[in-house]
Image: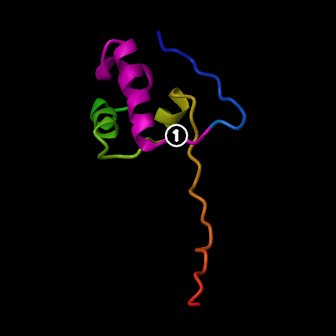
Amino acid sequence: MERVVPRRRGARPLTSMTVRERLMHACVGLGGQRAWARVHAVAPSYVSAVIAGEAEPGPKILEALELRREEPTYRPVEETSDE
């Protein structure tokens, strides 16, 4: 059975590696990548590609892991003085 981790307010963003690790652990919890893929209606090859870092997790995988994608934010480069 998958472990459900509630989203905390102010929780830090996760790295793509952390998301892949969560997916890997979720797969182990259900008996492997094929079993996890079957339960969540995604292709086993897609799950494998996400874990390998060859594909980004899509909506079905993110929903199953109780995650959401947040677009990166940008910040202006601090100007350096030539003094």
- Along the line of sight, the residue nearer the viewer: 27 or 6: 6
Residue drawn at point x = 57 percent, y = 18 percent:
4
Residue farthest to the right? 9
Q: Main secondary structure of the magenta part?
A: helix
Query: How far across and down, in percent of the image, does residue 55 sit?
Result: 34, 46
Q: Is residue 45 above or below residue 31?
A: below
Q: Is residue 73 left or right of residue 28?
A: right
Residue drawn at point x = 65 percent, y = 29 percent:
7
Residue drawn at point x = 47 percent, y = 9 percent:
1
Query: How far across and down, in percent of the image, does residue 19 sit?
Result: 45, 35
Mark 1 packing: few (<14 Cα in 10 Å), some, or many (20+)?
A: few
Q: Quadrant of residue 76?
A: bottom right
Which element carries disc 1, helix, strand or loop? loop
Query: How far across and down, in percent of the image, does residue 43 sit?
Result: 33, 32
Can residue 41 be seen here? no
Query: How far across and down, in percent of the image, does residue 53 sit?
Result: 31, 43
Image quadrant in which the C terminus is located? bottom right
Residue drawn at point x = 51 percent, y = 27 percent:
64
Q: Is residue 14 above or below residue 66?
A: below
Residue farthest to the bottom? 83
Q: Quadrant of residue 35?
A: top left
- Residue numbers of the magenta segment: 12-41
Q: Amino acid at mark 1?
A: Leu
Display colour scheme = rainbow
Report the residue marked by disc 1: 14
Can residue 27 be seen here? yes
Q: Is residue 36 above or below residue 12?
A: above
> Does residue 16 show up magenta in the picture?
yes
